[in-house]
Image: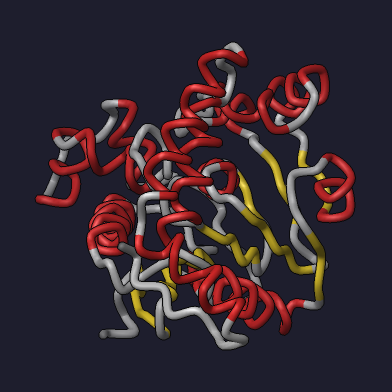
Amino acid sequence: MSESLPLLYETSGAVAIFTLNRPQARNALTPELVCRLADAVRDFLEDPALRVGVLTGTGDKAFCAGGDLGTMLPLMSGERAPADDWDRRVLEEPFVMAASSLRDYPIDKPLIAAINGPCLAGGMEMVLGTDIRIAAEHAIFGLPEVRRGVIPFAGSLARLTRQIPHALAMELLLTGDTFTAEQALRFGLINRIVPAADVLPQAMALAQRIAENGPVAVQAVKRTVRESSGLPLAQAYALEDEAKRIVMASEDAREGPRAFMEKRPARFTGR
């Protein structure tokens, strides 16, 4: 793995770690970075040995400042013609934007955001696609796109009002104002605030705890919560019933209670 790549992808046991690696540019998203992230997300999902993902950034200056203003946004607006294969993939492969923004791409494995610094625009949009969020004390958040004459287009217009109250979401989207980690915690957008040095270790510790649980059950929980969001209760209950059928028929569902009765750690296989 080259430290010069804009996206670092590595594994630790059953945990995959995605690191946005452009610290000199506040980890802003370029076409190459989003393509590499999309490919890494796909690899993560296809590897049965990996159970949880952690998304973070290099350094402490930023988690992600959003789309790179010199490369990504001009490409998306049509101001800049595609110059290489990375550019062409962004424009021609819907999978790239869907998977890299954690939007409109089915991800059943849990994702934890380790927010090591300011989290803006496309960076915040990715965070909205994660399940659990741990932020550094100096992190700030915001969706400033309207200040640049554009809009958030990686999920925020659909997701933000589902995660915080409507009026608050609309104020943030329409003003483009930034807000602090303390405010994000009050809004319910993040789970906890920790010192900067503890962000990744705490995210990894939490990921390891989740990875020890039954993967069939964990993925069924995430999938069902995602797919039932916004549905009438009767339809949501039907999805829950289907998840129960799948999970209770698994080997893991037999191993968990057996291990408890035998007073030993469960040996889940994901089957």
Residue 115 pos. (x, y %): 64, 63
Q: Residue at x 41, y 56 (%)?
A: 216
The C terminus lies in which quarter of the figure? Answer: bottom left
Camera sees residue 60: yes
Q: Residue at x 50, y 79 (%)?
A: 266
**Measured along the vertical axis of the image, is residue 88 above or below residue 113?**
above
Task: Say which of 167 and 50 sits in front.
Answer: 50
What is the quadrant of residue 39 in the picture? bottom left
Residue 27 pos. (x, y %): 49, 63
The N terminus lies in which quarter of the figure? Answer: bottom left
**Measured along the vertical axis of the image, is residue 120 above or below residue 12?**
above
As drawn, is 78 to the left or to the right of 212? left
Task: Say which of 187 and 28 sits in front.
Answer: 187
Q: Residue at x 50, y 64 (%)?
A: 55
Task: Say which of 121 and 251 sits in front.
Answer: 251
Residue 136 pos. (x, y %): 75, 68
**Measured along the vertical axis of the image, is residue 27 above or below residue 164?**
below
As drawn, is 67 to the left or to the right of 95? right
As drawn, is 242 to the left or to the right of 211? left
Q: Residue at x 43, y 80 (%)?
A: 267
**Measured along the vertical axis of the image, is residue 74 above or below residue 189?**
above
Camera sees residue 68: no
